[in-house]
Image (cartoon, rainbow, N blue to C red):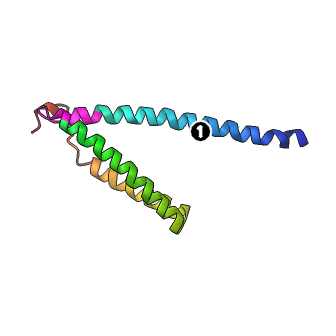
Amino acid sequence: MAILLAMLPLAQVGWLVVGLLAFGVLFAINSSWHSYLIVHYARADGVSMDVGFYYMANAMGRLMGTLLSGWLYMAYGLSACLWVSAALVAASALMALALPQGSDSKTRQ
């Protein structure tokens, strides 16, 4: 029994590594998918401006997300962070419904 208890921290580290690897793979897929979508939805005459705006908005979102989550956690705890995150995911899903459904994005003005 003592040997199993001594090995417990190693098992926890193993799960942590597996979780971080899974997060990294999903993050890489998500990042490449977003890059494809921004080029797909960009106007034909302003792709570089649309891509630049996307990366600027992405950086601002990361900054604001870091600040907001830190403040929420310090002021209200983990539960509030999860509720606000769920609300932002729902808002994002609703906004995604407004995206054009057609496959020919280059003809949009």
- Residue 56 appears in which quarter of the rendering? top left
Query: Secondary structure beneath disc 1?
Result: helix
What residue appears at the point 27 percent right and 41 percent down from the top-left corner? 54
* 101 left or right, relative to 20: left
Residue at 63% from the left image edge and 36% from the top image edge: 17
- Mark 1, other Cα within 10 Å: few <14 / some 14–19 / many ≥20: few
The x and y percentages for residue 25 are 49, 32
Image quarter hosting the C terminus: top left
Q: Give 100 or 63, whichever is nearer the viewer.
A: 63
Residue 94 shows in the view? yes
**Residue drawn 52% across and 62% down?**
73
Count of numbered circles in the view: 1
Question: Does residue 83 belong to the magenta stretch?
Answer: no
Q: Residue furthest right?
A: 1
**Magenta segment, which residues?**
37-48
> In the image, is residue 61 above or below residue 19?
below
- x, y percentage for residue 30? 40, 36
Q: Is residue 92 above or below residue 84?
A: above
- Disc 1: which residue: 19
Q: Where does the image place residue 38, in percent across and percent down from the top left?
A: 26, 36
Q: Is residue 89 visible?
A: no
- 70 vs 87, left or right, is right
User: Label 1 amino acid?
Assistant: Gly
- Residue 39 percent across, percent down from the top left: 24, 32
